[in-house]
Amino acid sequence: MKRLAFVATLGLGALLMSGCDASAAMRFGWPEGVTPDGKEMVDLWTWSVIAALVMGILVWALIFWTITFHRANDAKKGVFPRQTAYNVPLELTYTAIPFVIIAVLFYFTVIVQNNVESKNDDSKVVVDVTAFQWNWKFGYNQVEFSDGTTYNGFEQNGNPFEVQAQTGSGAETEHAGSDEGGEHGELPGPAGGRDDDIRDYLKFDKIETVGSSSEIPVLVLPTGKRIEFNIASADVIHSFWVPEFLFKRDVFPFPEQNATDPVFQIKSIDRTGAFVGRCAEMCGTYHSMMNFEVRAVAPEDFDSYIRFREANPGATNAEALAAICQAPESVTTVPFDTRRATDGTVGATGDPDNPTLANCTKKVS
Ligand SMILES: [Cu+2]
């Protein structure tokens, strides 16, 4: 008993001294959600784990009680133990209790899921997300500025090859994503054996941010506003995942034929900062390097950002970020280094909680 108490104290001590605060410990390994939905999901997760732990402790206690106090001793050896089968009330009880537990978990899961998946027409920003092997393109389809004015950024539907041909070489780089060529940022090939000319579900916007093998795409979004994402893949199935949103959704090619819902919304992002995004569906060779970054900025900075990009169509995303005093490149992740060499700087390159530029004056266009 003494030894058991010692081991328990040691375990508890290790847990408490490992440096994680109480709220982090209660998330049981999940990141802190930065959206209202994320927080709701953390609560569901926390209570589900607690329910499982209570059940686990009960089962462990029964096991240890049995092996401690009901061991076969000399007096009991060879004696057939007392039989307790066919105790109908007891059997009904332990059938009913798990059923109640499952019903309660199911109830709260459905409530949270419906909340997370809820949509309305009140989005202030509509973003078109295009996933391709192996990067991302983000376009601003609709924006409602803080002063109530709106911006319509939708250009056209179509497949990338057609759009290139129509808009010429200037747009080629913009739409193709990579001016580098390499396998990392190349144009996607035909999908699912279908012809390219029916990829008319892909959307192209006036303001787009495209990742390449040398630059992580940074998607700038405002805090405190409902945001709609319209996701589509140009080739295989990808998955849009921002761990701190605690939400991921598969990105399909041909969403209609695949009977998937490509639209989801988040109610708001509750704080400024940089949040890494990843592809969460095994999509090929460079799947694990298919990262992006969500940069949540104050609404007025977001307005300035969009106006800057609108007024300076030739400017890069990095220049637009610098214009609102944000770090011009991603701070949460870096592009995959194809040289497979490292100088020790691979990983985070800045402070995700404060990715602003020091001593910087905002250029308001
Ligand atoms: Cu992918």
Image (cartoon, grey):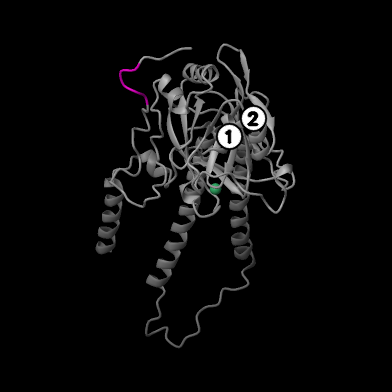
Q: Position of residue 311 (x, y in %)?
A: 53, 16
Bin the neighbour count of mark 2 within 10 Å (Cα to Cα): few under 14, some 14-19, many 20 and up: few
> As rendered, which of 348 and 194 lies closer to the eye?
194
Q: Is residue 327 left or right of residue 209?
A: left
> As rendered, which of 49 and 313 lies closer to the eye?
313
Whether the residue under disc 1 has CB within 8 Å of ligand 1: no
> Mark 1 sits on what residue?
172
User: What is the quadrant of residue 273 in the picture?
Assistant: top left
Determine if residue 266 is in view.
no
Q: Is residue 152 left or right of residue 271?
A: right
User: What is the quadrant of residue 271 in the picture?
Assistant: top left
Q: Position of residue 74 (x, y in %)?
A: 37, 85
Q: In the rendered structure, which amino acid carries the disc numbered 1?
A: Glu
Image marks 1 and 2: residues in contact by CB distance under 8 Å: yes
Membership of 281 in magenta stretch? no
> Mark 2 sits on what residue?
167
Q: Please, what secondary structure does the residue beneath circle 1 have?
A: helix
Numbered-mark total: 2
Which disc number belongs to residue 263?
A: none
Q: Please, what secondary structure does the residue beneath circle 2 have?
A: helix
Give the residues in magenta: 356-360
Q: Dividing the image into 4 quarters, which one contains the N terminus?
A: bottom left
Distance of label 1 from label 2 (alpha carbons): 7 Å
* Secondary structure that dominates the magenta span: loop
> As rendered, which of 198 and 80 lies closer to the eye?
198
